[in-house]
């Protein structure tokens, strides 16, 4: 078994695809492009960092049910 070293890129780049392979699924593409720029994550590390930041900003509170109208 051989070991493979993956070096980080100098800057974040999009994923390369070969449009001649596979099948066309416009739904995936349309979902990607319809997202706001801050929801287009190029790596799992970026997604993880954004999720942690959102969790840190989240708040919860308890409300009396009779106070809900």
Image (tube, grey):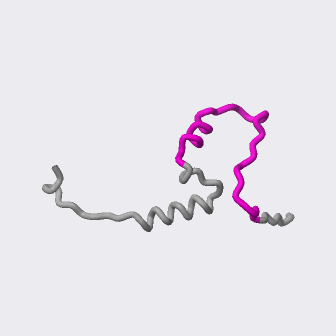
Foreground of the two, 10 or 51:
10
Residues shaded magenta: 8-36
Is 63 magenta? The answer is: no
Above or below: residue 59 compared with residue 42 = below
* Residue at image coords 81%, 66%: 5
Left or right, 16 with reference to 63: right
| Residue projecting furthest to the left | 66
Is 16 magenta? The answer is: yes
Above or below: residue 8 compared with residue 27 = below
Q: Main secondary structure of the magenta part?
A: loop
Above or below: residue 24 compared with residue 5 = above
| Residue projecting furthest to the right | 2
Foreground of the two, 55 or 10:
10
Q: Position of residue 26 (x, y in %)?
A: 62, 32
Q: Position of residue 46 (x, y in %)?
A: 60, 60
- The answer to which image quadrant residue 56 occupies is bottom left
- The answer to which image quadrant residue 1 occupies is bottom right
Left or right, 20 with reference to 37: right
Q: Position of residue 23 (x, y in %)?
A: 70, 32
């Amino acid at each position: 078994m051989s070991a493979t070293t993956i070096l980080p890129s100098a800057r974040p780049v999009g994923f390369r695809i070969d449009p001649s392979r596979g099948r066309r699924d416009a739904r995936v593409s349309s979902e990607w492009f319809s997202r706001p720029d801050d929801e287009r994550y190029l790596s799992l590390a970026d997604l993880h960092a954004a999720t942690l930041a959102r969790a840190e900003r989240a708040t919860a509170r308890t409300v009396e049910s009779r106070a809900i109208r």
